[in-house]
Image (tube, rainbow, N blue to C red):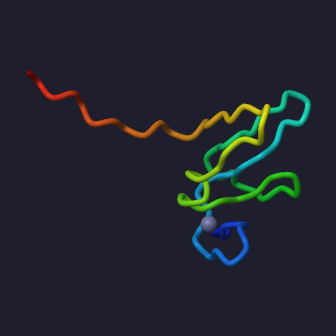
Amino acid sequence: MRRACARPGCSEPATATLSYGYASATVWLEPLTPEGHPMTHDLCDRHAARTVAPRGWELVDERAPVRLAPPLAS
Ligand SMILES: [Zn+2]
């Protein structure tokens, strides 16, 4: 079962789960969790990529790292 992005007006399938760790002022981006939770927000790729931490907060992206192109051989 797929869940949709939580952003208003967005109906893309969710690929990431956003949660806020208030105690540590940390915003977590994780791969989509199997179950929805009232304290988390499911986001599509586009909205997950646009996520910014509030001032004074740290954004921790725990999703699979984007594979970077290898450096060109010189
Ligand atoms: Zn979205």
Which residue of the protein is positioned furthest toward the top in this rendering? 74
Where residue 56 sits: x, y (%)?
Answer: 79, 31
Where residue 39 sits: x, y (%)?
Answer: 87, 52
User: Residue 21 lies in what quarter of the image?
Assistant: top right
User: Residue 61 lies in what quarter of the image?
Assistant: top right
Where residue 45 sits: x, y (%)?
Answer: 54, 58
As drawn, 71 above or below 18: above
Left or right: where does residue 59 sit relative to residue 26?
left
Residue at 73 percent across and 66 percent down: it is: 6
Position of the C terminus by quadrant: top left
Left or right: where does residue 2 sit relative to residue 19?
left
User: Residue 72 lies in what quarter of the image?
Assistant: top left
As drawn, 5 above or below 54: below
Which residue of the protein is positioned furthest toward the right in this rendering? 23
Number of marks in the image? Answer: 0
Residue at 75 percent across and 39 percent down: it is: 27
As drawn, 20 above or below 42: above
Which residue of the protein is positioned furthest toward the front in this rendering? 55
Residue at 67 percent across and 45 percent down: it is: 52
Is 9 in front, or is 40? 9
Where residue 34 sits: x, y (%)?
Answer: 69, 54
Ligand 1 quadrant assignment? bottom right
Residue at 77 percent across and 37 percent down: it is: 55
Position of the N terminus by quadrant: bottom right
Left or right: where does residue 16 sit relative to residue 65?
right
Left or right: where does residue 64 sit relative to residue 8?
left
